[in-house]
Amino acid sequence: MTYKILISDPISDTGLAALKASETVELNVQTELTKEELVKIIGNYDGLIVRSQTQVDAAIIEAADHLRVIGRAGVGVDNIDLDAATKAGILVINAPDGNTISAAEHTMAMMTALSRQIPDACKSLKEGRWERKKFKGVELFKKTFGVVGFGRIGMEVAKRAKAYQMNILAYDPFLTDEKARRAGVTKATLDEIYTQADFITVHTPLTKETHHLIGAEAFNKMKADVRLINCARGGIIDELALYQAIKEGKVAGAAIDVFENEPPENHPLLTLPQVIATPHLGASTVEAQEKVARAVSEEILQIFNGEPAQHAVNLPPISDQVRRALEPYYQLSRQLGVTAVQLVKGAPQDIEITYSGELTDIETAPLTRSILQSVLAKYLGDHINPVNVKYYIKESGVTYNVKRTQQSHGFTGLIKVRLTSETDERSISGTLLNGYGPRIVKIDDYNVDLPTDVHLLYIEHHDLPGLIGQVGTVLGEHHINIGSMQVGRKSVGGHAIMVLTIDKNVNETPIDALQHLEHIQAVKLINL
Ligand SMILES: NC(=O)c1ccc[n+]([C@@H]2O[C@H](COP(=O)([O-])OP(=O)(O)OC[C@H]3O[C@@H](n4cnc5c(N)ncnc54)[C@H](O)[C@@H]3O)[C@@H](O)[C@H]2O)c1
Ligand SMILES: O=C(O)[C@H](O)COP(=O)(O)O
Protein backbone atom coordinates (compact mmCIF):
# COMPACT_ATOMS: atom_id res chain seq x y z
CA MET A 1 0.00 0.00 0.00
CA THR A 2 1.33 3.45 -0.91
CA TYR A 3 0.18 6.53 1.00
CA LYS A 4 0.09 9.79 -0.89
CA ILE A 5 0.99 12.87 1.13
CA LEU A 6 0.63 16.45 -0.07
CA ILE A 7 2.75 19.22 1.44
CA SER A 8 1.05 22.53 0.75
CA ASP A 9 3.19 24.98 2.77
CA PRO A 10 6.98 25.44 2.81
CA ILE A 11 8.34 22.74 5.14
CA SER A 12 11.95 21.95 6.07
CA ASP A 13 13.34 19.43 3.63
CA THR A 14 15.70 17.93 6.23
CA GLY A 15 12.80 17.43 8.62
CA LEU A 16 10.98 15.34 6.00
CA ALA A 17 13.74 12.70 5.95
CA ALA A 18 11.60 9.96 7.53
CA LEU A 19 8.83 10.38 4.94
CA LYS A 20 11.30 10.57 2.07
CA ALA A 21 12.99 7.37 3.20
CA SER A 22 9.71 5.48 3.53
CA GLU A 23 8.90 3.05 0.73
CA THR A 24 5.20 3.27 1.49
CA VAL A 25 4.94 7.03 1.06
CA GLU A 26 4.69 9.14 -2.07
CA LEU A 27 5.37 12.83 -1.32
CA ASN A 28 4.16 15.72 -3.38
CA VAL A 29 5.26 19.27 -2.49
CA GLN A 30 3.06 22.03 -3.98
CA THR A 31 3.29 25.21 -1.98
CA GLU A 32 1.71 27.68 -4.40
CA LEU A 33 -1.73 26.10 -4.82
CA THR A 34 -4.83 28.26 -4.95
CA LYS A 35 -7.80 27.12 -2.89
CA GLU A 36 -9.58 25.91 -6.05
CA GLU A 37 -6.53 23.89 -7.11
CA LEU A 38 -6.27 22.33 -3.67
CA VAL A 39 -9.96 21.37 -3.69
CA LYS A 40 -9.43 19.74 -7.07
CA ILE A 41 -6.49 17.54 -6.06
CA ILE A 42 -6.97 16.86 -2.35
CA GLY A 43 -9.15 13.81 -3.07
CA ASN A 44 -6.03 11.96 -4.27
CA TYR A 45 -4.26 12.19 -0.92
CA ASP A 46 -4.15 10.18 2.31
CA GLY A 47 -2.17 12.81 4.20
CA LEU A 48 -1.76 16.58 4.12
CA ILE A 49 1.01 18.57 5.81
CA VAL A 50 0.55 22.32 6.35
CA ARG A 51 1.89 25.28 8.33
CA SER A 52 -0.33 28.29 9.05
CA GLN A 53 -0.69 29.42 5.45
CA THR A 54 -2.99 26.80 3.93
CA GLN A 55 -6.56 27.37 5.07
CA VAL A 56 -7.95 23.86 5.44
CA ASP A 57 -11.61 24.82 5.46
CA ALA A 58 -14.83 22.81 5.16
CA ALA A 59 -14.75 22.88 1.34
CA ILE A 60 -11.31 21.29 1.26
CA ILE A 61 -12.28 18.70 3.87
CA GLU A 62 -15.42 17.85 1.90
CA ALA A 63 -13.33 17.20 -1.20
CA ALA A 64 -10.79 15.13 0.74
CA ASP A 65 -12.33 11.69 0.14
CA HIS A 66 -9.30 9.67 1.19
CA LEU A 67 -7.64 11.98 3.66
CA ARG A 68 -6.80 10.23 6.94
CA VAL A 69 -4.51 12.73 8.61
CA ILE A 70 -3.65 16.41 8.52
CA GLY A 71 -0.26 17.19 10.02
CA ARG A 72 0.26 20.75 11.23
CA ALA A 73 4.02 21.40 11.28
CA GLY A 74 3.68 23.85 14.15
CA VAL A 75 1.35 24.66 17.04
CA GLY A 76 -1.71 26.72 16.04
CA VAL A 77 -4.48 24.81 14.25
CA ASP A 78 -6.82 27.77 13.79
CA ASN A 79 -6.28 27.48 10.00
CA ILE A 80 -7.88 24.02 10.07
CA ASP A 81 -11.64 23.49 10.38
CA LEU A 82 -11.42 21.01 13.25
CA ASP A 83 -15.16 20.34 13.43
CA ALA A 84 -15.30 19.47 9.74
CA ALA A 85 -12.18 17.29 10.03
CA THR A 86 -13.56 15.49 13.08
CA LYS A 87 -16.89 14.86 11.39
CA ALA A 88 -15.09 13.52 8.34
CA GLY A 89 -13.00 11.26 10.57
CA ILE A 90 -9.76 12.98 9.63
CA LEU A 91 -7.18 12.98 12.37
CA VAL A 92 -5.44 16.30 12.95
CA ILE A 93 -2.03 16.26 14.60
CA ASN A 94 0.37 19.07 15.39
CA ALA A 95 3.96 19.50 16.56
CA PRO A 96 3.34 21.34 19.82
CA ASP A 97 6.85 21.84 21.13
CA GLY A 98 9.13 22.01 18.09
CA ASN A 99 8.96 25.79 17.76
CA THR A 100 8.54 26.83 21.42
CA ILE A 101 12.09 28.13 21.85
CA SER A 102 12.09 30.01 18.55
CA ALA A 103 8.76 31.68 19.33
CA ALA A 104 9.98 32.62 22.83
CA GLU A 105 13.24 34.01 21.45
CA HIS A 106 11.33 35.99 18.83
CA THR A 107 9.10 37.44 21.55
CA MET A 108 12.17 38.60 23.47
CA ALA A 109 13.69 40.00 20.28
CA MET A 110 10.48 41.91 19.57
CA MET A 111 10.27 43.27 23.11
CA THR A 112 13.87 44.50 23.12
CA ALA A 113 13.59 45.87 19.59
CA LEU A 114 10.42 47.71 20.63
CA SER A 115 11.93 49.13 23.80
CA ARG A 116 14.90 50.55 21.83
CA GLN A 117 13.16 51.28 18.49
CA ILE A 118 15.80 49.22 16.74
CA PRO A 119 14.02 48.75 13.37
CA ASP A 120 13.43 52.48 12.83
CA ALA A 121 16.88 53.43 14.16
CA CYS A 122 18.46 50.97 11.74
CA LYS A 123 16.36 52.24 8.84
CA SER A 124 17.24 55.87 9.62
CA LEU A 125 20.94 55.07 9.78
CA LYS A 126 20.83 53.14 6.51
CA GLU A 127 19.13 56.13 4.94
CA GLY A 128 22.14 58.24 5.93
CA ARG A 129 20.89 59.92 9.09
CA TRP A 130 22.47 59.94 12.60
CA GLU A 131 19.44 60.55 14.87
CA ARG A 132 20.66 59.76 18.40
CA LYS A 133 18.12 62.01 20.16
CA LYS A 134 15.12 60.62 18.28
CA PHE A 135 15.72 57.01 19.27
CA LYS A 136 15.85 57.16 23.04
CA GLY A 137 14.44 53.94 24.49
CA VAL A 138 13.39 52.44 27.84
CA GLU A 139 15.01 49.70 29.92
CA LEU A 140 13.44 46.35 30.66
CA PHE A 141 15.31 46.08 33.97
CA LYS A 142 12.90 45.99 36.96
CA LYS A 143 9.92 46.65 34.72
CA THR A 144 6.65 44.80 35.32
CA PHE A 145 5.99 42.27 32.59
CA GLY A 146 2.52 40.74 32.13
CA VAL A 147 2.43 37.33 30.48
CA VAL A 148 -1.07 36.35 29.34
CA GLY A 149 -1.12 32.61 28.60
CA PHE A 150 1.41 30.65 30.59
CA GLY A 151 1.82 27.54 28.45
CA ARG A 152 4.93 26.35 26.69
CA ILE A 153 5.93 29.65 25.08
CA GLY A 154 4.69 31.91 27.89
CA MET A 155 6.86 29.97 30.34
CA GLU A 156 9.96 30.14 28.14
CA VAL A 157 9.44 33.88 27.68
CA ALA A 158 9.18 34.31 31.45
CA LYS A 159 12.46 32.39 31.97
CA ARG A 160 14.23 34.76 29.60
CA ALA A 161 12.59 37.87 31.08
CA LYS A 162 13.84 36.83 34.50
CA ALA A 163 17.38 37.14 33.19
CA TYR A 164 16.50 40.78 32.46
CA GLN A 165 15.35 41.01 36.09
CA MET A 166 11.82 41.90 35.12
CA ASN A 167 9.02 41.52 37.63
CA ILE A 168 6.73 38.95 36.01
CA LEU A 169 2.95 38.74 36.45
CA ALA A 170 1.37 35.73 34.77
CA TYR A 171 -2.24 34.95 33.97
CA ASP A 172 -3.50 31.61 32.74
CA PRO A 173 -6.70 29.83 33.83
CA PHE A 174 -4.59 26.72 34.50
CA LEU A 175 -1.82 28.43 36.41
CA THR A 176 -1.61 27.14 39.97
CA ASP A 177 0.15 28.87 42.87
CA GLU A 178 2.65 26.02 42.98
CA LYS A 179 3.47 26.26 39.26
CA ALA A 180 3.83 30.04 39.52
CA ARG A 181 6.12 29.65 42.53
CA ARG A 182 8.30 27.11 40.72
CA ALA A 183 8.52 29.38 37.67
CA GLY A 184 9.41 32.37 39.85
CA VAL A 185 6.46 34.47 38.65
CA THR A 186 3.52 36.08 40.42
CA LYS A 187 0.12 34.65 39.60
CA ALA A 188 -2.11 37.57 38.66
CA THR A 189 -5.53 38.42 37.31
CA LEU A 190 -5.94 40.06 33.94
CA ASP A 191 -6.92 43.30 35.66
CA GLU A 192 -3.77 43.24 37.79
CA ILE A 193 -1.72 42.82 34.63
CA TYR A 194 -3.58 45.62 32.83
CA THR A 195 -3.17 48.10 35.68
CA GLN A 196 0.43 47.27 36.69
CA ALA A 197 2.36 46.08 33.64
CA ASP A 198 4.84 48.11 31.61
CA PHE A 199 5.04 45.38 28.97
CA ILE A 200 2.33 42.84 28.15
CA THR A 201 2.81 39.79 25.96
CA VAL A 202 0.12 37.29 24.88
CA HIS A 203 0.73 33.55 24.42
CA THR A 204 -2.71 31.96 24.23
CA PRO A 205 -4.27 30.11 21.32
CA LEU A 206 -6.87 32.04 19.32
CA THR A 207 -10.25 30.74 20.50
CA LYS A 208 -13.73 32.17 20.95
CA GLU A 209 -12.66 33.16 24.49
CA THR A 210 -9.39 34.81 23.48
CA HIS A 211 -10.68 36.59 20.37
CA HIS A 212 -10.26 40.31 21.13
CA LEU A 213 -9.36 39.39 24.72
CA ILE A 214 -7.41 42.64 24.86
CA GLY A 215 -9.46 45.52 23.47
CA ALA A 216 -10.61 49.07 24.22
CA GLU A 217 -11.79 48.25 27.75
CA ALA A 218 -8.44 46.73 28.65
CA PHE A 219 -6.46 49.62 27.12
CA ASN A 220 -8.41 52.06 29.29
CA LYS A 221 -7.10 50.27 32.39
CA MET A 222 -3.46 50.19 31.30
CA LYS A 223 -0.58 52.52 32.16
CA ALA A 224 -0.10 55.17 29.47
CA ASP A 225 3.42 53.97 28.64
CA VAL A 226 2.48 50.31 28.33
CA ARG A 227 3.97 48.35 25.40
CA LEU A 228 2.33 45.23 23.96
CA ILE A 229 3.76 42.24 22.18
CA ASN A 230 1.76 39.70 20.16
CA CYS A 231 3.75 36.77 18.82
CA ALA A 232 0.84 34.34 19.34
CA ARG A 233 -2.15 34.93 17.06
CA GLY A 234 -3.66 37.88 15.32
CA GLY A 235 -7.04 38.67 16.84
CA ILE A 236 -6.12 38.06 20.50
CA ILE A 237 -5.48 41.80 20.65
CA ASP A 238 -8.20 43.84 18.90
CA GLU A 239 -6.12 45.46 16.13
CA LEU A 240 -8.35 48.46 15.48
CA ALA A 241 -8.76 49.17 19.19
CA LEU A 242 -4.96 48.98 19.53
CA TYR A 243 -4.56 51.46 16.68
CA GLN A 244 -6.95 53.88 18.41
CA ALA A 245 -5.26 53.42 21.79
CA ILE A 246 -1.84 54.20 20.31
CA LYS A 247 -3.21 57.22 18.43
CA GLU A 248 -4.80 58.49 21.66
CA GLY A 249 -1.57 57.97 23.64
CA LYS A 250 -3.06 55.23 25.81
CA VAL A 251 -0.47 52.71 24.61
CA ALA A 252 3.17 53.62 23.95
CA GLY A 253 3.92 50.96 21.37
CA ALA A 254 3.37 47.46 20.08
CA ALA A 255 5.40 44.67 18.53
CA ILE A 256 3.29 42.49 16.29
CA ASP A 257 4.28 39.24 14.57
CA VAL A 258 0.81 37.96 13.74
CA PHE A 259 -2.30 39.49 12.18
CA GLU A 260 -5.96 38.69 12.11
CA ASN A 261 -5.75 38.41 8.31
CA GLU A 262 -2.43 37.38 6.87
CA PRO A 263 -0.82 38.89 4.95
CA PRO A 264 -2.30 42.19 6.22
CA GLU A 265 -3.35 44.62 3.49
CA ASN A 266 -3.13 48.38 4.05
CA HIS A 267 -3.18 47.73 7.78
CA PRO A 268 -3.52 50.91 9.87
CA LEU A 269 -1.15 49.56 12.55
CA LEU A 270 1.62 49.39 9.97
CA THR A 271 1.35 53.15 9.42
CA LEU A 272 2.28 53.95 13.04
CA PRO A 273 5.89 54.70 14.09
CA GLN A 274 5.10 53.21 17.54
CA VAL A 275 4.51 49.80 15.97
CA ILE A 276 7.17 47.35 14.89
CA ALA A 277 6.15 44.23 13.00
CA THR A 278 7.40 41.02 11.43
CA PRO A 279 5.57 38.78 8.95
CA HIS A 280 4.70 35.85 11.26
CA LEU A 281 8.31 34.85 11.83
CA GLY A 282 8.06 33.40 15.36
CA ALA A 283 8.70 29.84 14.22
CA SER A 284 10.83 30.70 11.22
CA THR A 285 14.21 29.39 12.28
CA VAL A 286 16.22 26.56 10.80
CA GLU A 287 16.02 24.65 14.08
CA ALA A 288 12.27 25.05 14.69
CA GLN A 289 11.36 24.16 11.13
CA GLU A 290 13.46 21.02 11.22
CA LYS A 291 11.97 19.97 14.54
CA VAL A 292 8.32 20.48 13.56
CA ALA A 293 8.76 18.82 10.16
CA ARG A 294 10.53 15.84 11.74
CA ALA A 295 7.85 15.52 14.44
CA VAL A 296 4.87 15.48 12.05
CA SER A 297 6.66 13.26 9.51
CA GLU A 298 7.48 10.60 12.07
CA GLU A 299 4.04 10.71 13.63
CA ILE A 300 2.27 10.44 10.28
CA LEU A 301 4.32 7.35 9.50
CA GLN A 302 3.33 5.84 12.86
CA ILE A 303 -0.34 6.58 12.16
CA PHE A 304 -0.17 4.94 8.74
CA ASN A 305 1.42 1.95 10.52
CA GLY A 306 -1.71 1.69 12.67
CA GLU A 307 -0.12 3.10 15.83
CA PRO A 308 -2.11 5.58 17.94
CA ALA A 309 -1.34 9.27 17.48
CA GLN A 310 0.60 11.05 20.22
CA HIS A 311 -0.25 14.63 19.30
CA ALA A 312 -3.79 14.34 18.05
CA VAL A 313 -5.64 17.65 18.23
CA ASN A 314 -9.12 16.24 17.66
CA LEU A 315 -8.74 13.22 19.94
CA PRO A 316 -8.00 13.34 23.68
CA PRO A 317 -4.27 13.04 24.35
CA ILE A 318 -2.93 9.79 25.83
CA SER A 319 0.33 9.40 27.65
CA ASP A 320 2.95 6.88 26.57
CA GLN A 321 2.27 4.89 29.72
CA VAL A 322 -1.46 4.60 28.99
CA ARG A 323 -0.77 3.83 25.32
CA ARG A 324 1.48 0.92 26.28
CA ALA A 325 -1.01 -0.42 28.84
CA LEU A 326 -3.93 -0.30 26.37
CA GLU A 327 -2.16 -1.63 23.30
CA PRO A 328 -2.93 -5.32 23.92
CA TYR A 329 -6.62 -4.53 24.50
CA TYR A 330 -7.33 -2.76 21.18
CA GLN A 331 -7.96 -5.94 19.18
CA LEU A 332 -10.15 -7.38 21.95
CA SER A 333 -12.24 -4.24 22.28
CA ARG A 334 -12.84 -4.03 18.54
CA GLN A 335 -13.82 -7.70 18.34
CA LEU A 336 -16.16 -7.48 21.30
CA GLY A 337 -17.97 -4.60 19.60
CA VAL A 338 -18.16 -6.44 16.27
CA THR A 339 -19.45 -9.61 17.94
CA ALA A 340 -21.99 -7.88 20.17
CA VAL A 341 -23.55 -5.93 17.31
CA GLN A 342 -23.96 -9.12 15.27
CA LEU A 343 -25.53 -10.92 18.22
CA VAL A 344 -28.16 -8.37 19.09
CA LYS A 345 -31.39 -8.25 17.11
CA GLY A 346 -31.95 -4.79 15.62
CA ALA A 347 -29.92 -1.61 15.86
CA PRO A 348 -28.57 -0.91 19.33
CA GLN A 349 -30.15 2.03 21.14
CA ASP A 350 -27.91 1.85 24.16
CA ILE A 351 -24.35 0.66 24.66
CA GLU A 352 -22.98 -0.14 28.09
CA ILE A 353 -19.29 -0.86 28.52
CA THR A 354 -17.90 -2.21 31.79
CA TYR A 355 -14.20 -2.33 32.56
CA SER A 356 -12.91 -4.43 35.41
CA GLY A 357 -9.69 -5.76 36.91
CA GLU A 358 -6.57 -3.88 35.84
CA LEU A 359 -8.67 -1.79 33.44
CA THR A 360 -10.40 0.02 36.31
CA ASP A 361 -7.24 2.04 36.99
CA ILE A 362 -6.37 2.98 33.40
CA GLU A 363 -7.70 5.74 31.17
CA THR A 364 -9.83 3.56 28.88
CA ALA A 365 -11.33 6.28 26.64
CA PRO A 366 -9.40 5.02 23.55
CA LEU A 367 -10.84 1.51 24.06
CA THR A 368 -14.32 2.96 24.47
CA ARG A 369 -13.96 4.77 21.14
CA SER A 370 -12.81 1.56 19.52
CA ILE A 371 -15.82 -0.39 20.88
CA LEU A 372 -18.28 2.34 19.91
CA GLN A 373 -16.75 2.50 16.45
CA SER A 374 -17.00 -1.25 15.87
CA VAL A 375 -20.62 -1.30 17.07
CA LEU A 376 -21.76 1.69 15.03
CA ALA A 377 -19.91 0.77 11.83
CA LYS A 378 -22.45 -2.01 11.13
CA TYR A 379 -25.26 0.52 10.84
CA LEU A 380 -23.55 3.78 9.96
CA GLY A 381 -20.77 2.55 7.67
CA ASP A 382 -17.03 2.26 7.50
CA HIS A 383 -16.43 6.00 7.63
CA ILE A 384 -16.96 5.79 11.40
CA ASN A 385 -13.57 5.87 13.09
CA PRO A 386 -12.21 6.78 16.54
CA VAL A 387 -11.98 10.44 15.51
CA ASN A 388 -15.62 10.95 14.53
CA VAL A 389 -17.38 8.22 16.51
CA LYS A 390 -18.57 10.51 19.32
CA TYR A 391 -19.98 12.93 16.76
CA TYR A 392 -21.99 10.16 15.08
CA ILE A 393 -23.11 8.64 18.38
CA LYS A 394 -24.62 12.00 19.28
CA GLU A 395 -26.16 12.41 15.82
CA SER A 396 -27.73 8.96 15.83
CA GLY A 397 -29.28 9.37 19.27
CA VAL A 398 -27.64 6.18 20.58
CA THR A 399 -26.77 6.47 24.26
CA TYR A 400 -23.75 4.91 25.92
CA ASN A 401 -22.28 4.71 29.36
CA VAL A 402 -19.08 3.38 30.82
CA LYS A 403 -18.88 1.56 34.13
CA ARG A 404 -16.01 0.29 36.22
CA THR A 405 -16.09 -2.53 38.72
CA GLN A 406 -13.54 -4.39 40.76
CA GLN A 407 -15.29 -7.74 40.02
CA SER A 408 -13.20 -9.24 37.25
CA HIS A 409 -14.16 -12.89 37.98
CA GLY A 410 -10.52 -13.90 38.30
CA PHE A 411 -9.41 -12.31 35.02
CA THR A 412 -6.61 -9.73 35.01
CA GLY A 413 -8.65 -7.36 32.91
CA LEU A 414 -12.20 -7.85 31.65
CA ILE A 415 -14.32 -5.86 29.20
CA LYS A 416 -18.06 -6.37 28.99
CA VAL A 417 -20.15 -4.86 26.21
CA ARG A 418 -23.93 -4.84 26.60
CA LEU A 419 -26.13 -3.74 23.72
CA THR A 420 -29.80 -2.96 24.05
CA SER A 421 -32.00 -2.57 20.99
CA GLU A 422 -35.75 -2.01 20.84
CA THR A 423 -36.45 -5.75 21.02
CA ASP A 424 -33.33 -7.38 22.37
CA GLU A 425 -30.49 -7.13 24.88
CA ARG A 426 -27.16 -8.97 24.58
CA SER A 427 -23.89 -8.89 26.44
CA ILE A 428 -20.47 -10.27 25.75
CA SER A 429 -17.30 -10.24 27.83
CA GLY A 430 -13.70 -10.71 26.84
CA THR A 431 -10.26 -10.79 28.32
CA LEU A 432 -6.62 -11.26 27.42
CA LEU A 433 -5.44 -14.73 28.41
CA ASN A 434 -1.74 -15.09 28.97
CA GLY A 435 -0.30 -16.99 26.01
CA TYR A 436 -3.65 -17.14 24.17
CA GLY A 437 -4.38 -13.48 23.43
CA PRO A 438 -7.93 -12.06 23.24
CA ARG A 439 -10.71 -14.50 24.28
CA ILE A 440 -14.46 -14.20 24.57
CA VAL A 441 -15.30 -15.60 27.99
CA LYS A 442 -18.98 -14.93 28.38
CA ILE A 443 -22.00 -14.53 26.09
CA ASP A 444 -25.07 -13.34 27.97
CA ASP A 445 -25.17 -15.62 31.05
CA TYR A 446 -23.13 -18.44 29.51
CA ASN A 447 -19.44 -18.95 30.23
CA VAL A 448 -17.48 -19.74 27.07
CA ASP A 449 -13.86 -19.69 25.99
CA LEU A 450 -13.56 -18.62 22.37
CA PRO A 451 -10.81 -17.11 20.26
CA THR A 452 -11.71 -13.81 18.62
CA ASP A 453 -10.11 -14.25 15.21
CA VAL A 454 -12.48 -16.86 13.78
CA HIS A 455 -15.97 -17.25 12.34
CA LEU A 456 -18.55 -18.17 14.94
CA LEU A 457 -21.89 -19.88 14.62
CA TYR A 458 -24.08 -18.98 17.55
CA ILE A 459 -27.13 -21.16 17.98
CA GLU A 460 -29.92 -20.91 20.55
CA HIS A 461 -32.01 -24.02 21.07
CA HIS A 462 -33.95 -26.23 23.47
CA ASP A 463 -31.70 -28.57 25.40
CA LEU A 464 -32.69 -31.88 23.78
CA PRO A 465 -30.70 -35.04 23.01
CA GLY A 466 -29.57 -35.44 19.40
CA LEU A 467 -29.62 -31.77 18.43
CA ILE A 468 -25.85 -31.37 18.43
CA GLY A 469 -25.62 -34.32 16.02
CA GLN A 470 -28.20 -32.77 13.69
CA VAL A 471 -26.27 -29.49 13.59
CA GLY A 472 -23.04 -31.40 12.79
CA THR A 473 -24.79 -33.24 9.97
CA VAL A 474 -26.13 -30.06 8.35
CA LEU A 475 -22.73 -28.40 8.48
CA GLY A 476 -21.06 -31.54 7.12
CA GLU A 477 -23.52 -31.58 4.19
CA HIS A 478 -22.36 -28.04 3.38
CA HIS A 479 -18.66 -29.00 3.70
CA ILE A 480 -18.18 -26.78 6.72
CA ASN A 481 -15.48 -27.91 9.09
CA ILE A 482 -16.12 -27.34 12.80
CA GLY A 483 -13.03 -26.13 14.69
CA SER A 484 -14.54 -26.34 18.16
CA MET A 485 -17.91 -26.42 19.87
CA GLN A 486 -19.05 -25.17 23.23
CA VAL A 487 -22.44 -25.66 24.78
CA GLY A 488 -24.22 -24.11 27.71
CA ARG A 489 -27.68 -24.43 29.23
CA LYS A 490 -29.64 -22.80 31.97
CA SER A 491 -31.42 -26.01 33.06
CA VAL A 492 -31.83 -29.56 31.77
CA GLY A 493 -34.26 -29.39 28.86
CA GLY A 494 -34.36 -25.58 29.02
CA HIS A 495 -32.89 -22.78 26.97
CA ALA A 496 -29.38 -23.62 25.71
CA ILE A 497 -26.71 -22.25 23.42
CA MET A 498 -24.16 -23.80 21.11
CA VAL A 499 -21.20 -21.79 19.85
CA LEU A 500 -19.13 -23.31 17.08
CA THR A 501 -15.93 -22.02 15.56
CA ILE A 502 -15.89 -22.81 11.87
CA ASP A 503 -13.04 -22.72 9.39
CA LYS A 504 -14.57 -20.65 6.63
CA ASN A 505 -17.00 -17.85 6.09
CA VAL A 506 -20.35 -19.32 5.00
CA ASN A 507 -23.25 -17.99 2.98
CA GLU A 508 -26.90 -18.02 4.02
CA THR A 509 -27.70 -21.57 2.82
CA PRO A 510 -26.47 -23.59 5.84
CA ILE A 511 -27.86 -20.93 8.17
CA ASP A 512 -31.31 -21.39 6.61
CA ALA A 513 -30.97 -25.16 6.87
CA LEU A 514 -30.04 -24.91 10.56
CA GLN A 515 -32.88 -22.53 11.25
CA HIS A 516 -35.33 -25.07 9.84
CA LEU A 517 -34.27 -27.73 12.35
CA GLU A 518 -36.89 -28.36 14.99
CA HIS A 519 -36.11 -26.88 18.43
CA ILE A 520 -33.60 -24.40 17.07
CA GLN A 521 -34.63 -20.88 18.04
CA ALA A 522 -31.96 -18.70 16.48
CA VAL A 523 -28.81 -19.05 14.39
CA LYS A 524 -26.31 -16.27 13.94
CA LEU A 525 -23.16 -16.26 11.91
CA ILE A 526 -20.62 -13.92 13.45
CA ASN A 527 -17.73 -12.79 11.31
CA LEU A 528 -14.85 -11.25 13.19
N1 LIG B 1 4.36 33.60 16.00
C1 LIG B 1 4.60 32.35 15.74
O1 LIG B 1 5.17 32.01 14.73
C2 LIG B 1 4.17 31.31 16.73
C3 LIG B 1 4.98 30.19 16.95
C4 LIG B 1 4.54 29.20 17.82
C5 LIG B 1 3.32 29.34 18.46
N2 LIG B 1 2.57 30.42 18.21
C6 LIG B 1 1.30 30.62 18.90
O2 LIG B 1 1.59 30.91 20.26
C7 LIG B 1 0.48 30.55 21.07
C8 LIG B 1 0.96 29.80 22.30
O3 LIG B 1 1.59 28.60 21.92
P1 LIG B 1 2.06 27.54 23.04
O4 LIG B 1 2.88 26.52 22.32
O5 LIG B 1 2.63 28.24 24.20
O6 LIG B 1 0.66 26.92 23.42
P2 LIG B 1 0.28 26.21 24.81
O7 LIG B 1 -0.92 25.42 24.51
O8 LIG B 1 1.46 25.53 25.38
O9 LIG B 1 -0.10 27.42 25.76
C9 LIG B 1 -1.25 28.19 25.60
C10 LIG B 1 -1.71 28.61 26.98
O10 LIG B 1 -2.75 29.55 26.84
C11 LIG B 1 -3.62 29.35 27.93
N3 LIG B 1 -4.91 29.96 27.70
C12 LIG B 1 -5.96 29.48 26.98
N4 LIG B 1 -6.98 30.36 27.05
C13 LIG B 1 -6.57 31.40 27.81
C14 LIG B 1 -7.17 32.60 28.24
N5 LIG B 1 -8.43 32.92 27.89
N6 LIG B 1 -6.45 33.44 29.01
C15 LIG B 1 -5.19 33.13 29.37
N7 LIG B 1 -4.56 32.00 29.01
C16 LIG B 1 -5.25 31.14 28.23
C17 LIG B 1 -3.70 27.86 28.07
O11 LIG B 1 -4.14 27.47 29.35
C18 LIG B 1 -2.25 27.46 27.82
O12 LIG B 1 -1.53 27.34 29.03
C19 LIG B 1 -0.46 29.79 20.16
O13 LIG B 1 -1.45 30.68 19.70
C20 LIG B 1 0.41 29.40 18.99
O14 LIG B 1 -0.32 29.21 17.82
C21 LIG B 1 2.96 31.42 17.37
O1 LIG C 1 1.35 28.24 15.56
C1 LIG C 1 2.49 28.12 15.14
O2 LIG C 1 3.15 27.07 15.20
C2 LIG C 1 3.16 29.33 14.58
O3 LIG C 1 2.28 30.36 14.38
C3 LIG C 1 4.00 29.06 13.40
O4 LIG C 1 3.30 29.13 12.21
P1 LIG C 1 4.06 28.81 10.85
O5 LIG C 1 4.33 27.34 10.84
O6 LIG C 1 3.15 29.21 9.76
O7 LIG C 1 5.33 29.58 10.88
Image (spheres, helix red, strand yellow):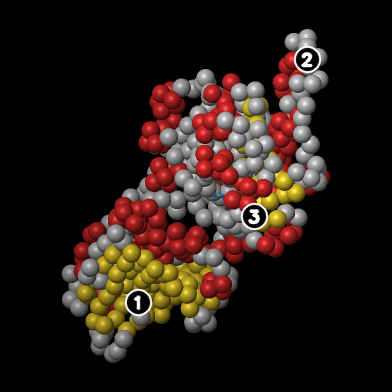
Label 2, label 1: how many angstroms apart (C-alpha)?
84 Å
Label 3, label 2: how many angstroms apart (C-alpha)?
41 Å
Q: Earlier in the sequence, mark 2 or mark 1?
A: 2
Label 3, label 1: how many angstroms apart (C-alpha)?
57 Å
Q: Amino acid at mark 2?
A: Leu
Label 3: which secondary element: loop
Residue bearing the label numbered 1: 444
The x and y percentages for residue 269 are 57, 26
Q: Is residue 201 visible?
A: no
Instruction: Kindly identify the residue that appears in the image at 64 percent across and 55 percent down.
Output: 188
Residue bearing the label numbered 2: 125
Q: Quadrant of residue 118?
A: top right
Which residue in the rendered view is the most extreme toward the bottom? Answer: 492
Residue bearing the label numbered 3: 188
Q: Reply above or below: 484 against 287.
A: below
The x and y percentages for residue 187 are 67, 56
Query: Disc 3 vs disc 1: which is toward the camera?
Result: 3
Instruction: Kindly identify the residue that appears in the image at 23 percent across and 59 percent down.
Output: 509
Query: Where ligand 1 lies, by image quadrant?
Result: top right
Q: Reply above or below: 317 against 66.
A: below
